[in-house]
Image (cartoon, grey):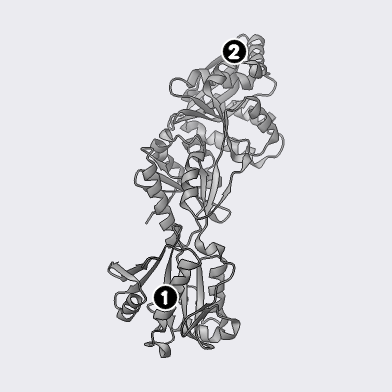
Amino acid sequence: MLTFEHTRKDDLLRFKPWFLVQNMHISDYSLAFQFMWHKALAPDYAFWGDCLILRELYAGKYYFYYPVSLSGSREEELSAIREIETYCRDTETRLHFTNVPQAAMPLLAARYAGVNISDNRRWRDYLYPAEQFKTYAGKRLSGQRNHVNKFMKTYPDWSFRPYEESDLAAVTAFLREYEGVQLEKEDRIADEEIAEVYEILPHLKEFGMDAGILTAGGKIVAFAAGERCGDMMIVHIEKALRGYEGAYPMIAHAFALAFCGEGVNYLNRMDDAGDLGLRKSKLQYLPCEIVDKFNVIPSKAVDAVAHPPEIETERLTLRPVPDSDAAAFARLASDIGRNRYWGYDWQDDCEEPPREGWFLDMVREDFRHRREMSLGIYLGKTLIGETVLHRFGYENEAEIGVRLLAEYENNGYAREAVRAYTEYAFSKLGLERVEAKCFLENERSRRMLQNAGMRETGSDGKFYYFYRTPEM
């Protein structure tokens, strides 16, 4: 199983080889982005094959970045996706992908029976041909070109030079002046961003970033810093003082000339965060692409079920347990001795002896979150046991379990319930595989599963494992 570790800022350099080769054109896959927005996003990370997998916790939900393969292999990415699915299944985590590039969408759309897709406009990156900023050629960029010419004419002693570590104090002073003038209105995102700019400055060389200083009259009037990722340069920082007309198009132009050499085909100038003024400005520079960052939530078979079903067999009825049978269900579910083979101890979730309805509430809560679907096993009007489909996966699979009250064992009821619920899973839910397991010492359950049409696949030191498919 995947093992995630929480990312500290000191860990970020481990990601550098993957970010250097990423070809998604998405700024989130970069050292500076992860550093500067670490406080808000604070990802966890894991490795699988040659893939880096990042996972964010946002608004109480986990979001998994699309895997980045060091070799660029789609097979490695697919292997990592399978492992993420297994992790989510085993930990009962709802699978959400985030920052999925356009090129990967056909793979995910074909992989899942259904997906919920979103692509928030405010977080899409603006991508430009790097050559465009070197020349500002053409009629549609004449405004930027005129601003650059005016800046050079107004400040004939202007200069642009690469940032050195010895410039830290001077650039910090420039940013203080910028902050005092530019950030007059309250803006939480802008405040967080400038705070992170101060923090990242001492790490520019460590992260392999390019940075430059624009001066006029010997005074720093603009500063920019970027990071090479694949065939693009991501401009993470671009600040200029108000009052120096043309400073922004000038620093963008000078930065591109200085640092966007061979192999740098694009400039990624990041998102607009929903700021309409910033959006207008970015659009005026004529992006060649506004880069999609898809969020993808795959569906599981159980998601489409509005209400648990009622299933008739030769002798039994499988149906949801009503409140009137809460006491009988509690007797089944609370018997620790009887349920040592169930694989779940209710005492882990309830310290005190629970009220009768607690067990039924838990079952219904699990269905509300589509974690499992439990049905009571009825002989006539009498509740004699429970069968459940759970551990729903993302390749149309689930696991089945069954338990009976002691006085109803040895009559074939468990086998009959498992067969009926498995056939429902194939015919109504569209599952392709139903799995089961039992403890090695539970020989009775082993025989029952075999007689219910399940095929044994082996054991590990604790369980025997079984499966069944529609053709079996």
Q: Position of residue 74 (x, y in %)?
A: 39, 42
First in sequence: mark 1 vs mark 2: 2
Vertical placement of residue 76 versus 203, above or below: below
Residue 73 in which image quadrant = top left
Residue 293 in which image quadrant = top right
Task: Point out which mark residue 158 bears.
Answer: 2
Q: Nearer the viewer, residue 365 or 79?
A: 79
Q: Is residue 246 visible?
A: no
Q: Position of residue 127 (x, y in %)?
A: 55, 30
Question: In the visual, does 23 lie left or right of 157?
Answer: left
Looking at the rendered structure, the kind of residue marked 2 is Trp
Q: Nearer the viewer, residue 302 or 180?
A: 302
Q: Residues within 10 Å of mark 1 (few under 14, many from 20)?
A: some
Task: Point out which mark residue 238 bears.
Answer: none
Image quarter hosting the C terminus = bottom left
- Callout 1–callout 2 Cβ contact below 8 Å: no
Count of numbered labels shown in the rendering:
2
Looking at the rendered structure, the kind of residue marked 1 is Arg
Q: Secondary structure at mark 1?
A: helix
Vertical placement of residue 303 versus 180, above or below: below
Q: Secondary structure at mark 2?
A: loop
State the residue position of label 1: 419
Q: Residue furthest front?
A: 471
Image quarter hosting the N terminus = bottom left
